[in-house]
Amino acid sequence: MSVDLERDGPVALITVNRPEALNAFDTAHLEALLARLREAGAGEGVRAIVITGAGERAFIAGADIKEMQGKTPLAAKGFAELGQAVCAAIEGAPQPAIAAINGFALGGGCEVALACDIRLASDRAQLGQPEVGLGILPGWGGTQRLPRLVGAGRAKEIIFTGRRVGAEEALRIGLVNAVHPAGDLLPRARELAAGIAAQGPLAVRHAKLAIGQAFGETGGGFAQEAQLFALLFGTADQREGMGAFVERRQPRFTGA
Ligand code: DAK
């Protein structure tokens, strides 16, 4: 149970290591990921960062629903800010970040992948934003970054239904850059990272900045998303949605 940081020359590999919960983010793992990202970003000679999940089933299955279940709107806001800080650290890192999506990338896990510069998926990967089924909305930038990547119509369909998107579809709609057999995923991600690391580091850093500016990676939409997210933590639907997950049953939403 940890978030590991490993150096291979100019490439930093960060692994979210909580496979018993499909690498879901509780506060401790989110804080650890933020620390590892800052360490990697500031690391002497680090030219590219790869992020992946431990085990064979999941990249990150989202925020820890069991921990989130009882949060008040105020506590939810703090949790949102921590998740947003993680995504901002990825986007703000001087080096490109590559998500190596080796399984489920759901909710906050999908949002971490969306904040990366490049996404590689294994043929077993499944991505999605299932939050509405829990009575909440994607709160770590999913409402902002997913539409930019796949277009508003597709993003709305994915977010409103909460359905999972398999690797091939994700490739077709531009949600991931490439799909590899599961066993090849990490070597291919490292190879891609090494290829980037061989380029002019200042040039790559500035290209990342310029592309980020063009697509307006910060702005009012993110603040509004966090506020709307927190509001939903005052609803019966949020309690019902998360309670149903924990009790392994279908939710009965009332719109209250
Ligand atoms: N949280 C906590 N535990 C989780 C989890 C999660 N997200 N996902 C899986 N687990 C745990 C399961 O509870 C189970 O634990 P035990 O019961 O064995 O102790 C273990 O991992 C294995 O999972 P399953 O037994 O469920 O495995 P299955 O193969 O049957 O199903 C699954 C795999 C990925 C389809 C299923 O586990 C699943 O649906 N998981 C939940 C996925 C999900 O809904 N993710 C989105 C979470 S919501 C915020 C903004 C954003 C967010 C939070 C805050 N703010 C603005 C405040 C983000 C929200 C989310 O990410």
Image (cartoon, grey):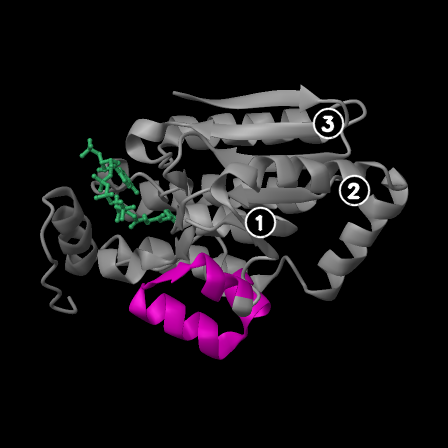
On screen, 48 above or below 80?
above
Assess disc 1: are there few (<14), some (14-19) or many (≥20) residues with their C-alpha within 10 Å of its C-alpha.
Answer: many
Name the residue beneath numbered marker 3.
Answer: 42
Tell me where the magenta segment starts and ends, as one range.
144-171
Mark 3 vs mark 1, CA separation in Å: 24 Å
Mark 2 neighbour class, 10 Å CA radius: few under 14, some 14 to 19, many 20 or more: some
Quarter of the rendered structure image containing ligand 1? top left
**Residue type, numbered disc 1:** Leu
- The main secondary structure of the magenta stretch is helix
Mark 3 crowdedness (10 Å alpha carbons): few <14, some 14-19, many ≥20: few
Q: Is 96 included in the stretch rendered in magenta?
A: no
Circle on res. 196: 2
Residue drawn at point x = 26 percent, y = 42 percent: 65
The quarter of the picture where the C terminus appears is bottom left
> Can the viewer see residue 221 in this picture?
no
- Label annotation for residue 20: none
Label 3 element class: helix
Residue 222, given in percent of the width and then of the height, sits at: 52, 58
Q: Which residue is mark 1?
A: 120
Q: Is mark 1 within 8 Å of ligand 1?
A: no
The amino acid type, in three-letter code, at marker 2 is Ile
Q: CA distance from mark 3 to mark 2?
A: 17 Å
Of helix, strand and loop, which one carries label 1? strand
The location of residue 93, given as percent across then percent down, is 70, 39
Amino acid under disc 3: Ala
